[in-house]
Image: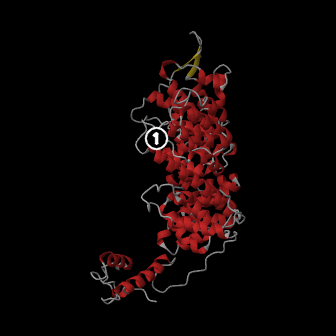
Amino acid sequence: MTSPSLPVDSLPMDSPAPDPWEELVTAALLGTDRRTPPGCPPGQEAPVALLDRAAVETVRRRAGLRPARAAERPRPAPEDPRPALPPAAARRLALLLADRPGAGGGRRGSTPDLMELLPQWLAAANERGFTPPAQALPALLDAARGRTDLRPAALTFAGPRAVWLARLNPDWRFALRTAPGGGTALPSLEDPQQVEQLWQEGLFAERVALLAAIRAREPSAARELLTTTWATERAEDRLMFLDSLRTGLGPQDEPFLEQALGDRSRNVRSTAAELLSALPGSALAARMAVRAGACVAVDHTGDAPTLTVEAPHECDAAMERDGVVAKAPAGRGERSWWFGQLVEAAPLGTWAGRLGGRTPEEIVALPVADDWQGELHAAWCRAAVRQRDATWARALLGSPAAPEAGGPGAVSLAERAKLLATLDVDERSEWVAGFIATHGLSEAFQLLGVCAVPWRGPLGRAVVDALNIARDAGSYPWSFSGVMGLAERCLDPSEAARLDGLLAIPDEPEDASPGATGYWAESFQRLVTTLRLRATMIAELDGREPPQG
């Protein structure tokens, strides 16, 4: 069957080819009695002709290869050795991809939001190493095109055929940009001649992918390869290559990073200094420890020991070489700006010796004179995150039940979320559960975002209990919509049975927001339905019978 579009050769050279689909849509909207479908005579058969041509154009638009002049036939798609999805899981994928965001105007009553479940489904399928059905790939790539958060998981699931399709359809070019090296196959790392040739002659994306692959396998070999061309690389390329050293960073990288401290690019120097400060045994860390230690002391002259701060009076050339940025941002004092950078880069292990052998908890509990506490504790927070020091993170977080909204050291919820990320999964979820039990959900949204999914038992129960308390108190329900949506995606599906008791519609309190009771009932119904659907999805991927209930 031929396409209804006009031949390219019949169009004027200076006018673009008309879009057949847009013409068909226009005819359908106006009616065939007012607008004849392109290429069809007017009359009673026009509606049938419109539908026929729409069917042809739909197939044409869904094709991986756009119509073009005759050319060399594409090479076959690469083989994907992974096992195929179980039939039930393949059908579920088709349903998830058929759901379109915005089709229902936002939240849709008690119906689960399938598009919000797609990321979880993809993660579970990738964990099990499945390959998608070939016919699902176009819809999968279309979904990833519209949502950048889906792309890593979607492209991993799509496998090598995603890159193959992306070379045929410009709508999916993002897959080439996202794939390592622009979708170019890397040479065997056992072939030093091919590796050297690609490093010397390859495109920038190919070289970044090659360096990352070698670094993940043999860190020292990647660093040695980088040194062969370091002096001739552009500044922006040096920065990207240097960033790859975060993987497998160790003491053996120190000589190269020390050399990079003298780089002519300020960004390269700053990144090298940051990497060195993450190595507590490095010479830079020792220099920073001396500088920061000279700024903080314990004053015993008062009724209780107090920390005193004497910030630097200048930022000399040696400090700048070690990564201290001399120019303070607008609204910041220079001395406090320099001081914060020194403390952030100093190894946290040095403070016990400097401050009388005290533990991190004892140090954080000391009062700080002259309103320096916020600056000092914020710098320690950044140091704990950079150095992945869980002991200091615990001290700065304090008890989740502490009355201070920001904790003893963190200056914001964002800081607390970063500190939590240094703790292990169980400790993190228990701390956030305790925080919710004391402070409720309104302050906990950012903290929930760093907890592992599915939420562990104590955390899941704390979230559900807090939502139930908010409902019974007649709280304004729409302010909890974000947490409710997060719960749908993150609660353990086994919690569904425990939620059945929350589905009843209670009497609406006199001081409740209008419509609040109905909203809460609808939201809890959607939560339960979504959790059961997630349990079914996992069972389908495992080839099991879905749980009953």
Direction front: furthest residue: 507
Residue 433 vertical position relative to residue 368 in the rendered view, above or below: below
Residue 351 vertical position relative to residue 171 in the rendered view, above or below: above
Q: In this view, does 427 lie to the left or right of 321?
A: right
Amino acid type indicated by mark 1: Glu
Query: Pointer 1: residues within 10 angstroms few (<14), some, or many (20+)?
Result: some
Question: x, y percentage for residue 3?
Answer: 42, 86
Question: x, y percentage for residue 80?
Answer: 66, 72
Question: Residue 395 appears in which quarter of the rendering?
Answer: top right
- Chosen colour scheme: secondary structure
**Quadrant of the snapshot with the C terminus:** bottom right
Question: x, y percentage for residue 246?
Answer: 62, 48
Question: Residue 535 appears in which quarter of the rendering?
Answer: bottom right
Q: Is residue 157 left or right of residue 443?
A: right
Residue at 52% in and 36% down: 413
Residue 301 vertical position relative to residue 479 in the rendered view, above or below: above
Residue at 49% in and 36% down: 473
Q: In this view, does 42 lie to the left or right of 529?
A: left
Question: x, y percentage for residue 82?
Answer: 69, 69
Q: Which of 199 and 216 is in front in this view?
A: 216
Residue 499 vertical position relative to residue 194 in the rendered view, above or below: above
Residue at 59% in and 66% down: 93
Q: Which of 228 and 406 is in front in this view?
A: 406
Q: Is residue 451 visible?
A: yes
Direction left: furthest residue: 34
Q: Can residue 185 be seen in this view?
A: no
The residue wearing badge 1 is 508
